[in-house]
Amino acid sequence: MFGTDEKPINANEKPIVNPEYFEARRGLFYLNDTCGIASYISALPNSIMEGWLAIELLLRRNHFLDISIFIYPIDEKEMLNRLDAKISELESKIREYEEKGREDVEPLRKEKEILELFRDKLILRQSKLFRANFLFYILSKSEENVENCYDSFRRRLQGINLVVSRVRYKVLEAFKSLLPEFHDLLPTHEIVDSDFLSASFPFVKSGLIHESGILYGFEVFTGHPIIIDRFKLAGHNEVIIGKIGSGKSFFAKLETLRWYVLDPKIKLYLVDPLSGFKDLADLLNAQVVKVGEVKINPLDLFILNDKSVVSQINEKISDLMDFFSVFYSEIGEKLNKIEAGVLRRAIFNAYKKGKVTENFIGNVTINDVYNKLLEVTRNYEEKQAAKNLLSSFEAFKTDLNMFNGRTEINTNSRVIYFDFSGVRTGTTVRPVVMHAILSWISAIIRGSFERKIVTIDEAHYFLSSLNIRKFLEKCVRHSRHYKAGYTLITQGFNEFLSNKEGMTILNNTDIFLIFKQDAIPDRILKLLDISEDCEKLIKEAVQGKISRFSTALLVLPGKDTFYINITSSPAEAAALSVSGKGC
């Protein structure tokens, strides 16, 4: 025991260097009004996860953890000689085992392989070796609690293949090694390379905070908040990937809710093939558009004053030709060049008769195009083409009548929710409907200066159709020009990787949120520069369905990567009707 003869120290200012009270016992020490356990690393894994020590130091736990690290460089020539000698010894032993037909030779081969790799890295100057002493001190208020905390700490490190051993007999020396006087008094050194050391330093990057953004989550290793304004990035698009129950849909709802609260002028469009966002639509008092029951005019044109009306009409006609291509594809036909030319002129002439009211042309409908088809023909071939078009256009008076008439949607609504539950799957109508909705949203996006977010749940339904995929790719590429961002939500990356349009979408995405996945395709690992450690984190991510929070890898390509905890406030959780269960 050692202490001081000076006047008593204020209980709130008890120094460790000269404490009021210290006592060492076997395996325990007592410091002022706490007790502690000292331990050290006694066995190392072949590789270690970057930031492992930061996790222990910076995440909130029910105990206090302190560390001392002593590092000494090793003479490379001496170490190479020792490695050569050890490798020769192993080679000799392996030959002996093989001659005797022993079956336990494989561990020796693996050890030799590791040592050879170690030696090659030293020779090529890819790494350096050090002697290092990692000492850990866990302090708590009671013996029982400090024992429990140490056991939990030991098991956590064991989970990443680090073995720690408890100091039982040299407790005083262990405590003195903690003091800021650089006294390394325990002979518990391990040989480590520079990769292990760099991964072990508890210096981690700061969080990301945009003043005008929304909270995405808290960095796991540091607890720093990650606040992002997607509209400050070069592009404004986002892809959310995750297994069922991983938390991806809840995060998308949380993000939408936070943008709704943050920016009273933002416009939000929810495209929902399976009614998964109905609760959010109700919460935000969204205008609910029951697709199939409400008239939506694909020819609606929202005019901006800074561009010529003719150029905007031509741009809109390009979108409409995509829409009609989907229509003809689904009914088993294909527009030939003459038919396409007649249809394009009929649309343009229909717009020439339209009226611009408050920067909006909404009185031109498919019926007007129908009436112009024969009128714009110039020869016999075009007349025949027009008759073919007229015949197929009859579908817009029956199954697709929802698209033939003036739009029955209030375009000034802050939140518009498209409910596809009334549109049967597996029908030729559904792809046409899906394209029409995307085309109508694209038109309204181009006609306003406010910030807009289009959230598409179950995006694989849209990506599975070539024509819809092409249109969506164009929307994503040009969204930033109209202060708009698309959020695509789906379970995996395969629907993007199997086609060039999907890859273009990924290359024009500035935010990726990857929730739990069993495997990450190699092309994605390369594209997003995801390390092995990050891939492991994705595979082990906490799922919102079974926890009070979820974890995800947040990737900003070319900028940064964060492993984050995603939680909701009690008010948000209550509003989203999840009883505080997080994601």
Image (tube, rainbow, N blue to C red):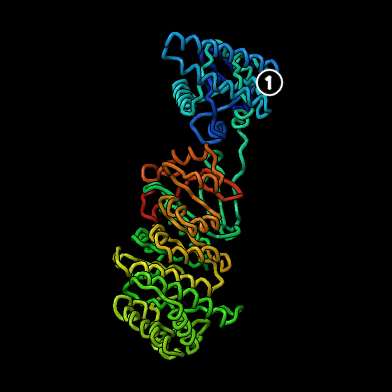
Query: Residue at the location (45% across, 23% down)?
Result: 151
Query: Residue at the location (56% across, 54% down)?
Result: 228
User: The residue tagged with tag 1: helix, strand or loop?
Assistant: strand
Image quadrant where one finds the N terminus: top right
Query: Residue at the location (47% across, 20% down)?
Result: 143
Q: Is residue 188 above or below residue 484?
A: above
- Write down the quadrant of residue 435 in the picture: bottom left
Q: Amino acid at mark 1?
A: Tyr
Query: Residue at the location (54% across, 15% down)?
Result: 167
Q: Position of residue 290 (x, y in %)?
A: 33, 70
Q: Is residue 289 above or below residue 345?
A: above
As drawn, is 402 to the left or to the right of 196? left
Give the residue number, with chain letter if any, for mark 1: 72
Q: Is residue 252 above or below residue 372?
A: above
Please name whichever residue, 358 or 57, is drawn nearer the observer in this view of the structure: 358
As drawn, is 4 to the left or to the right of 566? right
- Write down the quadrant of residue 197 in the picture: top right
Q: Position of residue 446 (x, y in %)?
A: 53, 72
Q: Position of residue 109 (x, y in %)?
A: 50, 19
- Decide if residue 471 is in sight here: yes
